[in-house]
Image (spheres, rainbow, N blue to C red):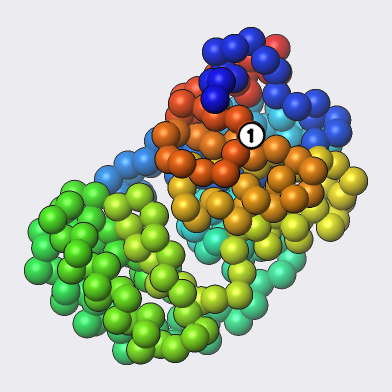
Amino acid sequence: MTDYSTAGEAMPDPRSHGFFFDFDGTLAEIAPRAEDVVLDQGLRADLLRLWQRSGGAVAALSGRRRADLARYLPAGIPLAGLHGWEIDGDTPDLAALAGALDGLRDSLAAIVARHPGARLEDKGPALALHWRLAPAAEPALTLAAEQAVTALGPGWVLQPGKCVVEIRPRGHDKGDALRRFMAHPPFRGRRPVAFGDDLTDIPMLRAARQAGGLAVAVGERDLPCDLRLAGPAALALWIRRSLE
């Protein structure tokens, strides 16, 4: 597919579209540790300009917690965290969900500790096992996560990603979050444009297409999409050129 950041094509009209962005791997380059990610300040300013030109119809949807995501993005941009479980104006009892994982944290931490460079990320109601710095640990960490989800029961799912597998509650995803945003102003009545780079973004990309909008894949992963951009830098360039 054409890389639209280099093809001279402008983004869809911000007066009639709503824009939904994944964060890691889409707006920002992936880092070995989540806390090491940096969002380009020029892109941050351009996201604010896009938010203003669209009348506020820009949102970020991430596997991160909303509070963490808010550290990077301009104030006012609506956020959905934990793959849609945390969303502006509608946050369920996450403490109860986090409590369901209490019996797993220590055992998973012990497994991760056997693999130098691997990491257990505790998100409260979700646990993510990372092996970006320990690629040989992938089989062991994936097996441990699969066994944990089986033990937890049908209310939990395994969410794979780039060098990570996450144990999270069933019931919401980024597609659900997009539809919830689209039901209310300033998104209501617009065509959605969704940007994502990983398996966790597939529900969001599909939801945008089902609503008559566009799905934009960022990077090389095979995702359902209408357009493709080479990576976060290409996305940043496309936004900037479209706002000129």
| Number of residues whose C-alpha sits closer than 10 Å to that of mark 1, classed few (under 14), some (14–19) or many (20 or more) | some
Which three-letter amino acid code belongs to the residue tagged 1? Answer: Asp
Considering the image in quadrants, where does the N terminus appear? top right
Direction from residue 177 to residue 54 in the image, left or right: right
Image quadrant assignment for residue 85: bottom right
| Residue 111: % across, % down | 16, 74
Question: Which residue is located at x 87 percent, y 49 percent?
Answer: 188
Direction from residue 156 to residue 84 in the image, left or right: right
Considering the image in quadrants, where does the C terminus appear? top right
Q: Which is more toward the observer, 44 or 117?
A: 117
- Circle 1 SS class: loop
Q: Quickly name the residue at label 1.
A: 226
The residue positioned farthest toward the right in the image shown: 189
Q: Which is more toward the observer, 44 or 159?
A: 159
Question: Which residue is located at x 49 percent, y 86 percent?
Answer: 154
Q: Which is more toward the observer, 96 or 197?
A: 197
Direction from residue 69 to residue 153 in the image, left or right: left
